[in-house]
Amino acid sequence: MTLFARLASDVQLMFRRPPRQQYAALCYRVKKKSSELEVLLMTSRDTGRWVVPKGWPMDGRCSYEVAAREAFEEAGARGTVEKQPIGTYSYPKVLKSGLRVACRVQVYVLEVSDIAKNFKEKGERKVEWVSCDEAVKRVQEPELRDLFLLFKRRMAEQLATRSPKQIPAE
C-alpha cells in the first residue's frame, strides 16, 4: 500500500461516524379463525419502500417503549411489546439535509391487539398485513429479511404448542 493510499484510508477512518441508533417494532397478529401469522408492513414516507415502524431514541423512554410508540404513531398499532430485541438490522438513511448516514435498528416484537382509527401519520403511508414470506419479498434490507424468517420459525414453534384458546384475536 502506498503512503498516499494509507493516509487516505486513515483519514476516512477518522471521519467515519458510528451508525445512528433507531428502534423498530415487528408488529404481528395471529388470525383467530385460520391461525395464520401476519406481520405489519408499511411504506416509508420518502422512498415508498416497505419498512417496519421505527424511530429515533426518545428522552425518558426505554428502547422497547420507543418501538411501541413508533408502531402507534406510524401505523396505529397498539399491543404488547417484548422488552428484549429479536435482533438488529442496518440500512442507509438519507436525512432531510441530503446527508446519507448509516443506521442500526434494534427490533422489538409487538403483538398487536388493536389498530387505532386515528393516529399521527394516518394517510401518509400505505399499511398492509402480510405473511412473513411476503414481508421477506418486499423489504430491501437483508438483515431485516432474516429477522422475519427468524420470527416465523419462532412463532411456528410457539403456535404448535398452543391450544386454540391461547391464540390471540385478530
Image (cartoon, rainbow, N blue to C red):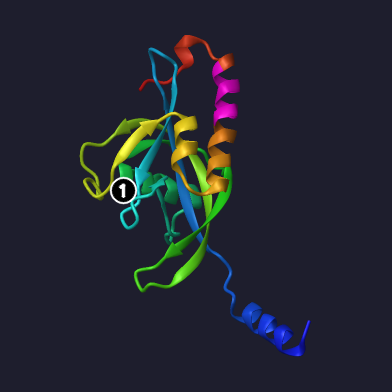
Image height of 162 relative to 101, above or below = above
**Which one is nearer the viewer's eye here, 46 or 39?**
46
**Quarter-wise, where is residue 112 in the image?**
top left
Does 73 sit left or right of 80 as displayed? left
Magenta stretch, residue numbers: 152-159
Q: Which residue is mark 1?
A: 73
**Quarter-wise, where is residue 15 in the image?**
bottom right
Image height of 138 relative to 19, above or below = above
Q: Position of residue 12 (x, y in %)?
A: 62, 80
Q: Position of residue 23 (x, y in %)?
A: 48, 52
Q: Is residue 105 magenta?
A: no
Residue appearing at x 76%, y 89% in the figure: 3
Which secondary structure type mostly characterizes the magenta part of the structure? helix
Q: Is residue 158 magenta?
A: yes
Which secondary structure lies at badge 1? helix
**Is residue 164 in view?**
yes
Tell me the quadrant of the picture where the C terminus can be found: top left
Identified by mark 1, the residue type is Glu
Image height of 161 relative to 106, above or below = above
State the residue lying farthest toward the bottom.
Answer: 3
Tell me the quadrant of the picture where the N terminus can be found: bottom right
Residue appearing at x 24%, y 45% in the figure: 119
Does 118 sit left or right of 35 as displayed? left
